[in-house]
Every structure is written in structure tokens, then in C-alpha cells.
């Protein structure tokens, strides 16, 4: 049972446009959500997070939106840059558990 | 740089041999995690420590796998009698371990290839 799902394995966008990456979760106990970026042969790098008490968190070009009723979150990157090309992982955790549960990732390609 | 450090970065071993990976977490972090990642999948949780106590182990962690964090600082992950299915990237991560907003920070990973 995969509790965190990223249904789009890949996404391709033009430089300067918006990239929207989506993530769905099934466990209603999750109360903290994170996005990571991963380049080949490297470990995931933390990008941005959001607590379940918020519905939006913004950091520069990156904004995460949380829809608790739909159990859905999304990462918006505006404007997209070629250096953003990487695999993006969504993760979720809850207060009483130590671990984070990850989705299988979406490969973003930003074309110049 | 005081990020999470892993050693070795790459390991090729013959099936049946034992391997050990080391992780040094961010110094002020009291939680340490081990994850495993294979191609096309996200990181899969293996185990985590709060200081020196191992608080949770995944069912993925067979009895050939053992992890330790003897002094609550660095950790080792040992795989005994390696199998080809153990080939993966082994990721270590650490966090402050607060009850909410628990952001984990990963190291560069240790690639294991079992031939």
C-alpha cells in the first residue's frame, strides 16, 4: 500500500514557464509534507516543506500548496530554469512517527 | 561543510560477502535514518535512531541487515551475506528530531553493487 503517490513519472516544460508537480497521500495522520530534489548519483536535497496547519508555503521560486480535504499537495516552480531539471520527491510524515514516507518521484525536464 | 557524510560512496562486492557503511550525521541532530533507494523508486525507510536507541525498523530490514549507533553520533549499517537484490543506493539522513516539522537532511548516499 503506497501511502504517498506521484502519479506523473515525468514532466517537461519550457524555460520561464511554470512547473507544477503533484502528489497525493492516503494517510490522514500525515501532518507534515516535504519536497526534495535529486540529481543523479546524489542524495535528495531538501527544497521546501509545509505543515498541515497551513495551505501554502512560499520560498523564492518554489511554492507548495496543500489541500487537506483532497489529500493532495503540489509544488509550483516559477519561473522554471534548466537547472531545475531533476527528480522531485514528495514526502510525508506525522508527529508521532519518526520516519518520512516518500513517493516514487517525478522527473522534471526544463527545456531552454 | 557540516552536512551528512557517508562512506564509502561506492562499493562493489561479491555475492555472499559482508559490507559496512558509515554515516556521520549533522552534529546537532539527534535522529539518524537509513533509507534505501533503487532506480525508479523513492527512498524506502529502513530504520531510525533517536540518539543511540533504535526506535523503528522496517520489515524490509531482513536479519542480514543490522544498524548501530553506539554513542549516539555516527552510525553503521552492515549487510551480511550480500545478495544481488541488495544492490541499491543506501541513504543516511539526520534531523533535529522535533515532534513537528521534522525535516530530514540526506547525505550523498553509498552505492552498493553486488556482483
Image (cartoon, coloured by chain):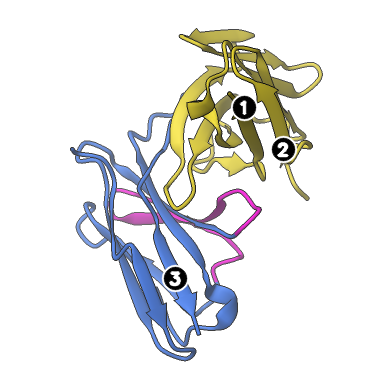
Chain colours: A yellow, B blue
Asked whether residue B16 is in view, the answer is: yes
- Residue that label 2 marks: A10
- Residue that label 1 marks: A111
Which mark is drawn over residue B52? none
SS of the residue at dot 3? Answer: strand
Q: Choose mark 1 or mark 2, whichever is in front.
A: 1
Q: In this view, does B81 lie to the left or right of B98?
A: right
Give how far across and how far down residue A110 sits, in percent: 61, 27
Q: Residue A75 in magenta?
A: no
Asked whether residue A54 is in view, the answer is: no
Q: Is residue B11 left or right of residue B114?
A: left
Chain under disc 3: B
Give how far across and how far down residue A14 sits, in percent: 66, 20
Give how far across and how far down residue B65 sits, in percent: 46, 74
Look at the image and give the residue range highlighted in magenta.
Answer: B39-61
Residue at position x 71%, y 31% in the image: A11
Amino acid at each position: 500500500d503506497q501511502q504517498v503517490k506521484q502519479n506523473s513519472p515525468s514532466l517537461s516544460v519550457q524555460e520561464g514557464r511554470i512547473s507544477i508537480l503533484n502528489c497525493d497521500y492516503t494517510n490522514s495522520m500525515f501532518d507534515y509534507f516535504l519536497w526534495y530534489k535529486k540529481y543523479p548519483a546524489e542524495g535528495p536535497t531538501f527544497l521546501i516543506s509545509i505543515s498541515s496547519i497551513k495551505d501554502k508555503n512560499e520560498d523564492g521560486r518554489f511554492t507548495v500548496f496543500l489541500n487537506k480535504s483532497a489529500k493532495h499537495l503540489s509544488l509550483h516552480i516559477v519561473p522554471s530554469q534548466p537547472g531545475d531539471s531533476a527528480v522531485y520527491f514528495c514526502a510525508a510524515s506525522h508527529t508521532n512517527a519518526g520516519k518520512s514516507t516518500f513517493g516514487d518521484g517525478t522527473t522534471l525536464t526544463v527545456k531552454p | 561543510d557540516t552536512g551528512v557524510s557517508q562512506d564509502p560512496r561506492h562499493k562493489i562486492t561479491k555475492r555472499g560477502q559482508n559490507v559496512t557503511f558509515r554515516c556521520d550525521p549533522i552534529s546537532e541532530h539527534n535522529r539518524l535514518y537509513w533509507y534505501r533507494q533503487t532506480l525508479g523508486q523513492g527512498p524506502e525507510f529502513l530504520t531510525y535512531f533517536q540518539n543511540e536507541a533504535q526506535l523503528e525498523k522496517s520489515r524490509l530490514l531482513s536479519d542480514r541487515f543490522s544498524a548501530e549507533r553506539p554513542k549516539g553520533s555516527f552510525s553503521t549499517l552492515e549487510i551480511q551475506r550480500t545478495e544481488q537484490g541488495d544492490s541499491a543506493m543506501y541513504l543516511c539522513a539526520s534531523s533535529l528530531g522535533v515532534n513537528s516539522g521534522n525535516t530530514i537532511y540526506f547525505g550523498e548516499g553509498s552505492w552498493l553493487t553486488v556482483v
